[in-house]
Amino acid sequence: MEYTPYKRHAYYYETDKMGIVHHSNYVRILEESRVDFLTKVGLPFTVIEDRGLMIPVLSVSVEYKYPLRFDDEFEVICEIEKFNGCKFSVKYTVNNLTTGKLSAVGHSSHCFTDEQLIPVRLKKKQPDIYEIFKCYCTDGKEE
């Protein structure tokens, strides 16, 4: 199944004195795109949280390639790279649509927990959510 990438323009407040998007704002952009991805695949955060699940961030990294500048249009392509039924990792490709250049590549890792932050095995507790993640995982491995 395919989804449409997250798209928007770089905001003025995100830029620094050099006129480029400050490196700290890329982590926010990754989160925006992850939330957008989950919504587009049928799992908005309201649904996830209403079902008693949380998705804490375990790690995040960004490799900067070419800067985004104020008002550049960009897209973020999200891919679930790994998923084992409890933990998953996401790869983010940030493409500058104004210049046609790759701006950044990011990675984040997460796990599913209950509201007390106890890990949850989706296959057993939330099989429909498990199936959606399995469907969008690009590593092709099953739990």
Image (spheres, rainbow, N blue to C red):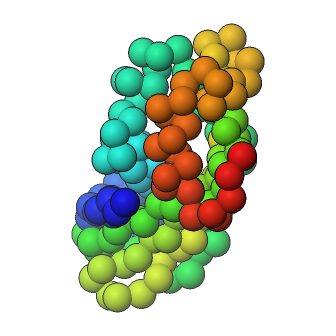
> Where 31 sits versus 12, above or below?
above
Q: Examine the rendering and report whether any part of residue 26 can be seen.
A: no
Q: Position of residue 48 (x, y in %)?
A: 45, 25
Q: Residue at x 63, y 63 (%)?
A: 140
- Nearer the observer, 52 or 124: 124
> Where 80 sits versus 50, above or below?
below
Q: Residue at x 33, y 88 (%)?
A: 99
- Nearer the observer, 139 or 80: 139
What residue occupies the far bottom of the structure in this picture?
100
Residue 77 in which image quadrant: bottom left
Give the total number of marks visible in the rendering: 0
Q: Is residue 7 left or right of residue 103?
A: left
Q: Position of residue 129 (x, y in %)?
A: 49, 34
> Where 73 sits versus 123, above or below?
below
Q: Position of residue 122 (x, y in %)?
A: 62, 30
Q: Is residue 37 left or right of residue 87?
A: left
Q: Examine the rendering and report whether any part of residue 66 can be seen.
A: yes
Q: Residue at x 67, y 39 (%)?
A: 85
